[in-house]
Image (tube, rainbow, N blue to C red):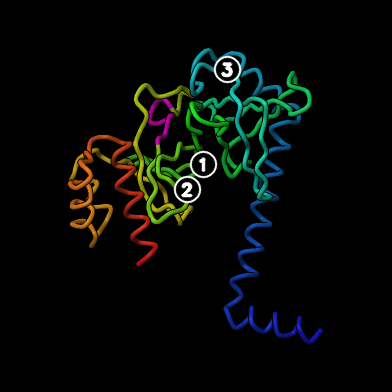
Amino acid sequence: MKHSYYVITLILLLGGRPIQALAQAARDQAEARTIYHQANSKPQSTTLRAELTKHTSGFFGDGSFQPGALRTFDGRYRPVPGLRFHAGSHLIEAQDSIDTDSTHLWPVGSLRGFDLGTADGPGTPPVRRFRPRLVKEGSAGTRRDFVEVLTAVDAGPLLLAWLYASGADATAGRLSFAPLLLAGAGNAPEEPLHPLDLNQAAVLRLFGKRAADMRTFADAQRLHFDQPTEVARIIDHYNRVAVVK
């Protein structure tokens, strides 16, 4: 009891932040479970599956199931035999681990993210990481969508990502022919990611007072500001420097 008293006192002195974080995590899990159960219960499951069957486009890739993993709000990493992402509907369909003829539906809000591919060894394609983030395009309002993370970490000071359903394509439930590159704070999930122009001035503005240092790094590494993968390397370097200092 005496130990519990000191723990509670310490939490109160810290402003209750641990309690608030636990409460928010519990709310996120409860909301995720609700979204998942609604998507997999009739009549919504029937409607969603009919939409997936009707669509011949809008999938990321060719629409076939690929090995991957789900990241759930209870902190679990759940490998699955196959999953596919319909970017137009913002929906994941994942095969059951025991009965691959059975699938489960995971809308945005039901997952902390998902990975496509497996790190089985040399020669295998890299795992592609998708995470739900708030996105904002131009003057339009914000919405939550799955984005493909290009930076090395999902929650660093800065994040670079592709959005595959944007603009009129998102409204119509289609995969965009030209995905939209987004950037923003990686460690503040309630701040929306914004479109990023691929030019030196726009990229360097991301780094604030460290812009000159990042330009020096890019020059030394012969990195280009109009190549997304190379911009991701510059941001990765900035994230390491920002965390250390």
Amino acid at circle 1 = Arg
Q: Say above or below: 58 vs 207.
A: above
Location of residue 77 by image quarter: top right
Which one is in front, 128 or 189? 128
Instruction: Work out whether residue 65 or residue 152 is closer to the camera in this orientation and state it.
Output: 152
- Quadrant occupied by the N terminus: bottom right
Which disc, if any, is residue 64?
A: 3
SS label for mark 2: loop
- What residue is pinned by disc 1? 131
Q: Residue furthest right?
A: 1
Q: How many marks?
A: 3
Q: Nearer the viewer, residue 204 or 59?
A: 204
Structural distance between the alpha carbons of marks 3 and 1: 20 Å
Identify the secondary structure beneath mark 1. Answer: strand
Which residue is denoted by mark 2 in the rendering?
Answer: 154
Residue 144: percent from left, percent from top: 50, 42
Q: Which residues are magenta?
A: 162-169
Under mark 3, the amino acid is Ser
Q: Residue 123: x, y in percent?
A: 48, 26
What is the secondary structure assignment of the residue under circle 3? loop
Within the image, what quadrant is residue 137 found in?
top left
Q: Is residue 100 left or right of residue 65?
A: right
Distance CA(mark 2)–CA(mark 3): 26 Å
Q: Residue furthest bottom?
A: 2
